[in-house]
Amino acid sequence: MILRTVSILGATGSIGDSAADILERDRGLGDGARFRVHAVTAGSKAMELAAVARRLDAKLAVISDEARYGDLKEALSGTSIRVAAGEEAVCEAAAEPADRLISAIVGAAGVAPTAAGIRAGNTIALANKECLICAGKAFMSLAREYGVEILPVDSEHNAVHQLLHGNETSAIEKIVLTASGGPFRAKSAAELERVTVEEALCHPTWSMGPKITIDSATLMNKGLELIEAHHLFAVPMEQLDVLIHPQSKVHAFVVFKDGSWHGELGAPDMRRPIAYCLNWPDRAETATSRFDLAEIGTLTFEKPDLRRFPALRVAQEALAAGRGSTTVLNAANEIAVAAFLGRQIAFMAIPALVEDVLQDADKAGLLNEPESVESALRLDGEARALARRRLKAA
């Protein structure tokens, strides 16, 4: 059996944790193991990164925060694991040969390392949204230039990838992504004005990091996923839709031109799409959650309420507008979510701030479609500056 080499960018986050669980179980298979781990990276969690590197017997551990280099080096002393630090070192780790590069760094910080992995010819298991939202057109162009396969890790896009297997996108009538509706699906507009940070961090279905949990609560996450789907599957906005599905068992539908609906079902367990990406184009037994449809009994679907959840509308409008609007949207949303988590702004001020920054960017003449990953990152920085100015003026 040929072992596949795997590297993980963002090994201490929720996706990294799930990937590590799969890879550690695989190591327990001995001669039957399918994977070996080459590099693991993290932002500033040196002790956690060292623990992951030891668990997975990685060859290289890289911490982005250079101030934590000494901690990481000391934690891995006595091992043969190489240690490095700094943003450039993360990009260099991403460019080292790997059969699968799991891109799970949260935020725009993950764009440059993922691009470095593409330029090295590594197949990307993509969990970083910003690669497609911040730099989608340029990112997919780069992947085509280097002949690199992009395998989506997000459960919804992973579902679409599975549903499209063997089908041409020209046969698609519509792609429908599902959303749990988050913790506030049934709350009134007045109640949403009083949402606390603690309430917003209590997702009813998924266990995720704080940023994506807040995005799920505002439904911005689903808007961002529509933008991702547009780039991943080369489908126009008019053929993309969202349904609220509280049970989180159906992750996406593909509606074909003959009128047939094809759905992908599975338990809300991120190990399942990660395992799919690691093993693709094959499938392998994975210790993920299972469910019994007869016990569930009923699956329900409803349209999202764009009045109560305007973040989804703002994201849809940014996708329709083009000209770098989704880059600005993403940057402004990151600043707004951080401000909410820091108790600087209210929950419903998140989409309002994002919409204001989009208008500011348009007035400043910043809205131009980025032609490269680097130009997308420059626009991202300019949009963040606009968002910070808006916060100071509030």
Image (cartoon, rainbow, N blue to C red):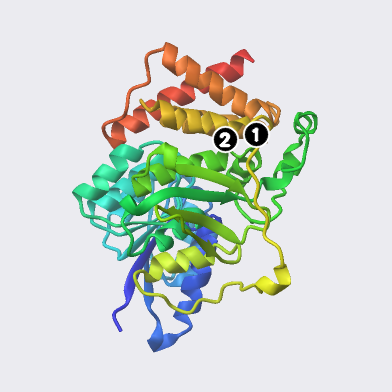
- 121 relative position to 376: left or right: left
Q: Which mark is residue 309?
A: 1
Q: Which amino acid, mark 1?
A: Phe
The residue at 48%/15% (across/down) is: 360
Residue linked to disc 2: 312
The CA distance from mark 1 to mark 2 is 6 Å
Q: Is residue 16 above or below residue 64?
A: below
Residue occupying the far bottom of the picture: 31
- 39 relative position to 175: left or right: left
The residue at 66%/32% (across/down) is: 340
Q: Is residue 265 above or below residue 117?
A: below
Residue 80 appearing in the image: no
Which residue is at the front of the view, 181 or 171?
A: 171
Few, some or many residues within 10 Å of mark 1 (<14, 14–19, 20+): many
- 183 relative position to 125: left or right: right
Q: Which amino acid, mark 2?
A: Leu
Question: Circles 1 and 2: CB distance less than 8 Å?
Answer: yes
Percent of width and height locating residue 229: 42, 46
Q: Is residue 374 above or below residue 280?
A: above
Which residue is at the front of the view, 185 or 262?
A: 262
